[in-house]
Image: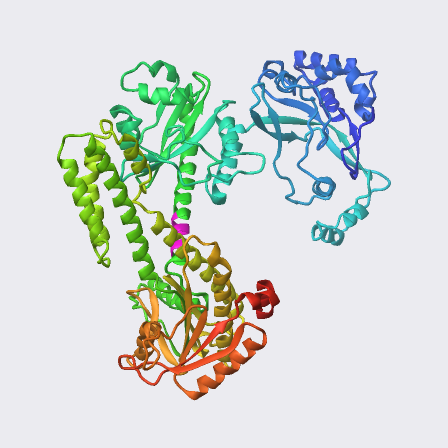
């Protein structure tokens, strides 16, 4: 079998012992008799082996002369160290090896691995350039730093991956030119150094097999499993927290390598300082389980630990080590913890507090199903890794806190993207002042000369409907209770049951009157304080036992009351709000392309929104009033779409609720200011307050001289104050009639005088959603035209 490189190479490789032979010839001339005799005997043994000096390409020669080569290399492979050192002879960067130490042979043969080292750290390009750099350094005396650590991973007999670093001793090798070698100039070497990625260039100056690599090297493997595992652990933890898994090395696998325990598992349990309890960690469930909680979400620490373990683990933050968990299951104080661990097949374990800045974050659980695998001796390895674990978990907690704050900001106190730049600028000024140790007072965030747009889609008569559902539930609950007590009193001699039935009937009669603000609370307090205790205390002795059981089963677990009709109402209200909000939020993405503007919306009994557009919000863009017109048309179209969506879903909802829509037109520019106390924008100045007054009162206003509300179901009401606004919106309506979104009929009227505001007018139009029109224009078609 010929000696060949794994990949193409500038070398022709020859295994040769010429340098070692030359060393032996020198020793043979020594005055030290035993050294001289030893060298002469070896030289005599190989005198008929000229290939040992000239070079070997046929690997069968190595196989045939294993014993002779072993004797020849005896000084380099001492017999006394053969069971300790992990060594073999080889040619650099080749997988073929020979003359193994006994420990090297045992490590590989125990797991059935071939004795050759299969180096996979380099691809073909890297391998070729690496060989060329070897020539540049040795022959052309360059000082190119090209080597990187070479590692070899081997599983041991227990299946744990051991990590070995390969160290080469190249004292017995030399590089010789051939007739195809190129004697490089300094300029050519510089070109090569600057063109690592150009493999063709390297092959041009170093043709394949143009140099001879003659000799052998000694490859020594050093077990760096623990160091490598800790390095991998740090890499994993530095990425995004302890839950991250590096390709080819999960955190659990790394711990197994460090502790050399093949069935090792790890868990983590968070600690809640305020409640003194263990809680499920707020991280990825696929990473760690919690052996202390064993599938529970939360449990008091003293419900798991005894006083001694609590004091040690929680108060003093000292690890607990149980090498034999079974030995504690009969222990009075430790049996609870031991039995919990044994139920999860944990026979030995280490419970290590994770502390950062004197703050206990949680408990790292290292467990094994083998008794004695984990003990007080190998538990000391935690000293190497706990600082990294503590940093990672602390960082994960901080990441979680930042995520919570980001979600809160997004969902509850978001700063809209259109105005975010101004807040960011103000914060930058604050940070700059902090860096210069100067005091800084935040300036008000305001935008002047912006044009407002306001609109809403409101649940019609929501308060009355809510009271109606409350009354239905109370009536049903009271009638059920009256039936129960009527059944009880027929089989009981106690007069109190008749008294309670009478009180329930009186309470029921009181519901025939309009509900007061506290009626529901009064009835609920009465039932919980007077009725429920009687039923619960005697439920097993009453003839109405089944009725009582059924009654309690039908109560809402949160309120303790009947909740069916209110639940249907709340569900319907939530669905409508969610649908309406999702439409306007989605359409807002398109609207921002018209011109960046401030947008906010609120969900109450319906959805209302505010828009503000003007040069001050986007000072780097050219503003034109045409953008206001465009946004007004967008607003009207969007309300049409929201009305259509409500019409589509309302018959599928458990409760019949109608909606009304309103737009307030206000053509005068105003200023808005961010109110720090309320964390929201509001109009600024007394004159601009008129706009807010109209917004708050307009949806309850009447048509002038009537008791008719200006808003009606399935219609959009547009409130304005001057002829120019009227003309503008009539044009929009005409266009929307053209695309069959609005019906032909247009109502125009004056609005009653509001407090401090008069002269308002309104246009009211009906959105196309009748059966006859829907047959001609499908919902999807209307939306397609709308877009």
The span picked out in magenta is 401-408
| Image location (x, y in percent) of residue 47 | 81, 16
From the image, which quarter does the N terminus lie in? top right
Q: Is residue 407 magenta?
A: yes
User: How was this image coloured?
Assistant: rainbow
| Image location (x, y in percent) of residue 215 | 75, 28
Q: Is 45 above or below relative to 560? A: above
Q: How many marks?
A: 0
Question: Of residues 705 and 371, which is closer to you in this image?
Answer: 705
Q: Is 743 above or below relative to 398? A: below
Q: Is 713 above or below relative to 494? A: below
Q: Is residue 383 magenta?
A: no
| Image location (x, y in percent) of residue 124 | 74, 40
Query: In the displayed structure, does residue 747 sit left or right of residue 40?
Result: left
Residue sitting farthest toward the front: 490
Instruction: Give the main secondary structure of the magenta stretch.
Output: helix
Residue sitting farthest toward the left: 495
Question: Of residues 146 and 54, which is closer to you in this image?
Answer: 146
Q: Residue at x 36, y 78 (%)?
A: 671
Question: Of residues 31 and 47, which is closer to you in this image?
Answer: 47
Question: Of residues 284 and 77, which is closer to you in this image?
Answer: 284
Q: Quadrant of residue 378?
A: top left
Query: In the displayed structure, does residue 150 sit left or right of residue 414?
Result: right
Query: In the displayed structure, does residue 530 sit left or right of residue 417?
Result: left
| Image location (x, y in percent) of residue 118 | 69, 29
Q: Residue at x 37, y 53 (%)?
A: 570
Query: In the displayed structure, does residue 58 sit left or right of residue 558?
Result: right
Residue 424 visible within the image: no
Residue 697 visible within the image: yes
Q: Is 438 above or below relative to 178? A: below
From the image, which quarter does the C terminus lie in? bottom right
Residue sitting farthest toward the right: 179
């Amino acid at each position: 079998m010929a000696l060949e490189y794994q990949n193409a190479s500038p070398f022709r490789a020859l295994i040769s012992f010429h340098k070692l032979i030359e060393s032996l010839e020198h020793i043979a001339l020594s005055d030290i008799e035993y050294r001289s005799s030893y060298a002469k005997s070896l030289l005599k043994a190989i005198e008929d082996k000229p290939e040992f000096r000239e070079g070997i390409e046929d690997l069968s020669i190595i196989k045939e002369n294993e014993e002779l080569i072993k004797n020849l290399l005896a000084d380099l492979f001492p017999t006394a160290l053969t069971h300790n050192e992990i060594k073999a002879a080889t040619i650099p960067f080749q997988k073929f090896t020979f003359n193994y130490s006994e420990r090297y042979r045992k490590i590989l043969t125990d797991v059935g691995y071939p004795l050759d080292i299969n180096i996979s750290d380099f691809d073909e390009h890297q391998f070729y350039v690496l060989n060329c750099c070897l020539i540049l350094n040795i022959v052309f005396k360059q000082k190119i730093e090209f080597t990187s650590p070479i590692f070899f991973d081997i599983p041991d007999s227990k299946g744990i991956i051991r990590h070995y670093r390969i160290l080469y001793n190249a004292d017995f090798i030399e590089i010789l030119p051939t007739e195809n070698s190129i004697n490089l100039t300094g300029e050519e070497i510089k070109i090569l150094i600057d063109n690592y990625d150009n493999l063709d260039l390297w092959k041009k100056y170093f043709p394949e097999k143009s140099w001879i690599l003659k000799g052998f090297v000694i490859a020594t493997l050093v077990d760096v499993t623990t160091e490598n595992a800790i390095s991998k652990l740090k890499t994993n933890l530095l990425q995004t927290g302890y839950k991250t898994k590096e390709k080819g090395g999960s955190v659990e696998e790394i711990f197994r390598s460090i502790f050399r325990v093949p069935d090792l598992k790890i868990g983590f349990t968070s600690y809640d300082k305020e409640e003194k309890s263990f809680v499920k960690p707020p991280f990825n469930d696929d990473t760690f389980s919690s052996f202390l909680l064993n599938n529970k979400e939360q449990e008091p620490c003293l419900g798991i630990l005894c006083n001694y373990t609590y004091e040690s683990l929680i108060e003093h933050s000292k690890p607990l080590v149980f090498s034999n968990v079974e030995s504690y299951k009969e222990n009075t104080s430790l049996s609870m913890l031991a039995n919990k661990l044994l139920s999860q097949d944990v026979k030995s374990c280490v419970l290590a507090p994770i502390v950062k800045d004197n703050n206990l974050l949680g408990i790292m659980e290292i467990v094994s199903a083998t008794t004695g695998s984990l003990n007080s001796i190998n538990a000391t390895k935690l000293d190497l890794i706990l600082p990294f674990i503590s940093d990672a978990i602390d960082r994960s907690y901080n990441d979680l806190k930042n995520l919570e704050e980001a979600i809160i900001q997004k969902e509850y106190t978001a700063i809209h993207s259109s105005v975010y730049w101004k807040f960011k600028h103000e914060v930058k000024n604050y940070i700059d002042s902090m860096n210069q140790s100067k005091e800084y007072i935040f300036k008000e965030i305001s935008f002047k000369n912006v044009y407002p747009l306001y609109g809403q889609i409101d649940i019609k008569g929501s308060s009355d409907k809510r009271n109606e559902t409350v009354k239905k539930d109370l009536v049903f609950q009271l009638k059920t209770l009256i039936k129960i007590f009527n059944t009880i009193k027929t089989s009981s001699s106690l007069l109190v049951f008749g008294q309670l039935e009478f009180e329930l009937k009186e309470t029921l009669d009181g519901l025939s009157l309009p509900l007061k603000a506290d009626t529901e609370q009064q009835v609920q307090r009465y039932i919980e304080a007077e009725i429920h205790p009687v039923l619960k205390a005697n439920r097993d002795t009453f003839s109405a036992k089944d009725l009582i059981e059924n009654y309690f089963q039908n109560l809402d677990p949160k309120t303790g009351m009947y909740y069916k009709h209110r639940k249907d109402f709340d569900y319907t209200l939530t669905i409508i709000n969610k649908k309406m909000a999702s439409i306007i939020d989605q359409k807002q993405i398109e609207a921002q392309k018209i011109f960046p503007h401030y947008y906010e919306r609120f969900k109450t009994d319906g959805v209302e929104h505010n828009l503000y557009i003007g040069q001050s919000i986007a000072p780097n863009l050219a503003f034109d009033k045409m953008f206001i017109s465009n946004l007004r048309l967008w607003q009207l179209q969007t309300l049409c779409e929201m009305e259509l969506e409500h019409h589509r879903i309302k018959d599928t909802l458990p409760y019949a609720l109608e909606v009304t829509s309103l737009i307030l037109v206000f053509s005068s520019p105003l200023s808005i200011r961010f109110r720090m106390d309320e964390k929201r924008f509001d109009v600024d100045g007394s004159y601009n307050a008129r706009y807010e007054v109209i917004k708050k009162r307009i949806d309850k206003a009447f048509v002038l001289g009537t008791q008719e509300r200006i808003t009606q179901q399935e219609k959009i009401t547009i409130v304005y104050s001057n002829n120019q606004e009227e003309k503008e919106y009539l044009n929009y309506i005409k266009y929307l009639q053209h695309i069959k979104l609005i019906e032909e009929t247009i109502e125009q009227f004056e609005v009653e005088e509001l407090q401090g505001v008069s002269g308002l007018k309104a246009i009211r139009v009906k959105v196309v959603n009748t059966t006859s029109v829907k047959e001609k224009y499908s919902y999807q078609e209307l939306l397609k035209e709308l877009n």
